[in-house]
Image (cartoon, coloured by chain):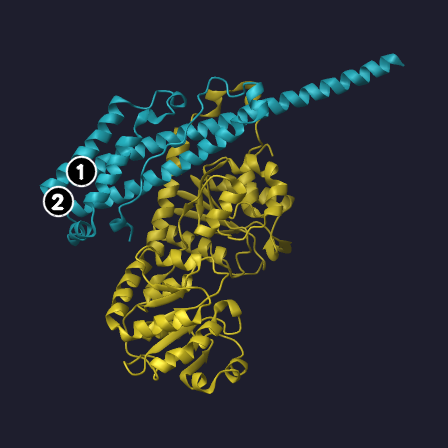
Amino acid sequence: MSDIDILQVATIIALVVLGAAWYLSYSASRLDRLHAKVEGAVSALDAQLVRRAEASLELATSGAVDPATSLLLADAASEALERHTHQPLSHDPLDGQTFAGREGTETNLTEALRAVLTAETVEELRTDADGPGALSLARVESTALRVQLARRFHNDAVREVRRVRGKAVVRVFRLAGHAALPHPVDFDDDLPPAVVD
Amino acid sequence: MRIGLVCPYAFDVPGGVQFHVRDLAEFFLAEGHEVRVLAPVDDPEADLPAYVTSCGRAVPVRYNGSVARLTFGPVTSSRVSRWLEDGDFDVLHLHEPITPSASLMALWASSEPVVATFHTANLRSRAMHAANPLLRPSTEKIRARIAVSEEARQTVRRHLGGDAYIIPNGVDTSRFTPDGATTRWSGTPERPTLAFLGRIDEPRKGLAVVVAAMPHILDALPGARLVVAGPGEVDEIAAALDPRVRAATEFLGAVSEDDKVALLRSADLYVAPHTGGESFGIVLVEAMAAGAPVLASDLEAFVAVLGDGPAGLTFPVGDSEALARAVIELVRHPGERHRLRDLGLRRARSFDWNVVAQRVMAVYETVIEGADNSPTESLVRGGLLGRLRWPTRGEA
């Protein structure tokens, strides 16, 4: 009698342990996927930011804008590029999630673009549709849009990671390992109103 | 680029989501991309474009408060998996991914980068709350969320958390050219024309609001003419009108597309007095593209379509007196109408498929770049643990 009881109890315990083990490893790999998504998103954002700064610099040196405009834009764009080179995202982006404090520089570039690309300037640049000014402007527009997209997708991914990492089971069993907690990246990336319509 | 689009509703039945998927697919095909569409199909004999694959017959099911034609079950499931395998897509773009149909099944089975577009603005929370823990691991696969309107975006925020990027519906604005010969609806300073479009017996289209404004308008502008284009019981509605308003109103009934364009092009003012239920104002975009100055009720969707300019004037929903004042003001000031017309023509261009699809392409490219830069799982954690993840294709 008691043998069977022990067997039954042992079976139940074994099943519970197996179930718990499965759930833990499932949660861990789900979290890994979410971390991987954030890593991909942050490097996509980084790449778009570099392209935006390059396009802005190109517009500044295209000869199609006046010298004051050119200087303003070149200043903000080269600062963004410099910060990217001197403080790149750490080799393992999971450890570099604070975005290296580049938010301020990128906001500056956004503001410079907005100040410079007034309705009149945009119209003037677009008059010569195949000129260097119009081509650079098109690049600025398309990279600025992609910066917006990449930042939003990154922040959505961050939010998902943080939600899962807030779960009790993840915290108690340290399923996140040594991965740093990712942070949303927040800076002004609004498109200049003149290029929106 | 190899693009896979999934539509949850029967492709051979007309509907907003279906048209959206069709227009997007055809735009990208014309751009030289490889595009395939997976959708349920109602009539197996239906004449479908070559890019469409059927994932099974749609059955009418009550979901989210209305009857939708959806598809599900093991046959659909295996067709979805086969389609994904054959397609070998660079990006998978799912429409309405949390509707229990093909999109949700594709999301479940996918291993490629996923973009999701949310169309609905009135999702019932009951269904979502009940299913949320089940759906979470799947929705976490989505790398980019698009909402077609601010209201759709709010729905995403409420039910899934997080945000969505707004890319509006595209409209084929090329049909709505602003120039052309004068028509029988062209207004003159003595006889200005106001255009109304929409079913006349559907209260939320707001015919009653304009009709109530007409006596005030006629007091100030005795020659004003209201042209009403839209199906419905004309006799019934007309009989109830004040005789003076009746005399100033012309009912066209249902009109052809060409007549619609001609009417919008000729009218001095397009009036959109809708009282609700509009998630996106396609007709406003069409009116702007045809060069009609727009005067619309201040519904959230309409305000969004008119933009920051704004490219049209608004009045409080259902307020006939405010509508009348605005009409009188605008008719008396042709300069203001010209200004609105120019703003409207520019605004309409931003809803053209050309612009909208380029934005969707920017989303695809951003998502693919992110996916390419994600470390592969084996690098993060491999072995036995790595194999016990959520089911992907072939395991499910």
The cyan one among the chains is A
Q: What residue type is labelled 1?
A: Leu
Q: What residue type is labelled 2?
A: Val
Residue at label 1? Answer: A73
Q: Quadrant of residue A70?
A: top left
Q: Earlier in the sequence, mark 1 or mark 2?
A: 2
The numbered dot on residue A65 is 2
For this rendering, which residue is in front, B60 or B73?
B60
For this rendering, which residue is in front, B172 or B226?
B226
| Location of residue A153 in the rendering, given as x and y in whole percent from the top left corner | 41, 37
Q: Chain B is drawn in which colour?
A: yellow
| Location of residue B225 in the rendering, given as x and y in whole percent from the top left corner | 37, 81
Element type at mark 1: helix
| Location of residue B195 in the rendering, given as x and y in whole percent from the top left corner | 38, 74
Left or right? Give the position of B65 relative to A97.
right
Left or right? Give the position of A86 relative to B274.
left
